[in-house]
Image (cartoon, rainbow, N blue to C red):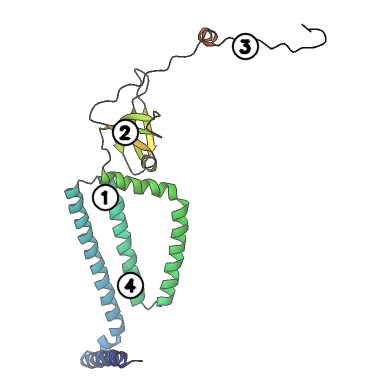
């Protein structure tokens, strides 16, 4: 142990002894009925202080998220999971601190935390497709490759036609398009997973509907016969009975 480590250890031990001595002096000055409840009053006060700090931190973070959403014009669909994540993170942290104040061992808390983390990792990989759609929804809301009311076309490559229509809704899982290729007099919607939007080519039209795709005329038997090339004559092989 180096000299500086020895000094720091000595200072820590001296502070702990000072705190214990002050606590003993405080016990002697309190009434007898309060000395019996002192071991309950102090942890209870600490637990109340932890709960109040957690409540205040949650309110502050939610207010900051609300101001950020108003500044960046984030939709309400994105605020719900963010507020839920903040709430459960603060509650879990406060619960761990409360259990520690109640005398639960740190080893037990760490074992429980690693167990929950393992279960969460397994659930994360099991629900990867759903979580990828949620993450891509966050990217759509922040990056804004398109917005509600735009006319877009989602296609595999730039040469092949794909799903085409007007964006009518964007939620945490799907982007809904009003199908532009539906038959006349019919209204149809296309629900495209948000992850698929970032895996395909997206063509966006500037405020006007895209031109309709010309229908392909069906092929008829007459066209097939007319366009068919004449068959080549079968060559005659020399033999004993057809010798020239």
Q: Which mark is residue 154?
A: none
Q: Quadrant of the C terminus?
A: top right
In primary-sequence order, the first of circles 4 and 3 is: 4
Q: Is residue 197 above or below residue 17?
A: above
Judging from the image, what secondary structure is the residue with disc 3 in? loop
Instruction: Give coordinates of residue 231: x percent, y percent.
Output: 61, 11
Question: Whole-Å distance between the Cαs marked 1 and 3?
Answer: 72 Å
Residue drawn at x 27%, y 88% is: 35
- Viewer-side label of 4, 2: 2
In primary-sequence order, the first of circles 1 and 3 is: 1
In primary-sequence order, the first of circles 4 and 2 is: 4
Q: Which residue is mark 3?
A: 232
Question: Whole-Å distance between the Cαs marked 1 and 2?
Answer: 28 Å
Q: Which mark is residue 79?
A: 1
Residue drawn at x 16%, y 49% is: 71
Q: Which mark is residue 203?
A: 2
């Amino acid at each position: 142990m180096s000299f500086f480590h020895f000094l720091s250890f000595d200072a820590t031990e001296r502070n702990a002894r000072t705190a214990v001595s002050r606590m003993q002096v405080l016990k002697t000055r309190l009434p007898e009925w309060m000395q019996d409840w002192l071991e309950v009053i102090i942890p209870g006060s600490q637990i109340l202080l932890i709960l109040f700090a957690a409540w205040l931190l949650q309110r502050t973070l939610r207010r900051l998220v609300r101001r950020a959403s108003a500044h960046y014009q984030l939709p309400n669909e994105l605020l719900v999971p963010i507020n839920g994540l903040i709430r459960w993170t603060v509650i879990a942290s406060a619960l761990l601190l409360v259990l520690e104040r109640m005398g639960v061992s740190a080893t037990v808390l760490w074992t429980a935390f690693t167990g929950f983390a393992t279960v969460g990792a397994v659930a994360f990989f099991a629900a990867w497709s759903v979580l990828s759609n949620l993450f891509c929804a966050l990217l759509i809301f922040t990056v804004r490759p398109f917005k509600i009311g735009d006319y877009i076309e989602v296609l595999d490559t730039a040469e092949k036609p794909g799903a085409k229509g007007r964006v009518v809704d964007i939620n945490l899982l799907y982007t809904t398009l009003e199908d532009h290729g539906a038959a006349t007099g019919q209204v149809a919607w296309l629900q495209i997973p948000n992850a698929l939007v970032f895996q395909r080519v997206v063509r966006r039209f500037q405020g006007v509907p895209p031109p309709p795709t010309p229908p392909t005329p069906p092929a008829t038997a007459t066209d097939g016969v007319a366009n068919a090339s004449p068959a080549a004559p079968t060559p005659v092989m020399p033999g004993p009975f057809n010798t020239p």
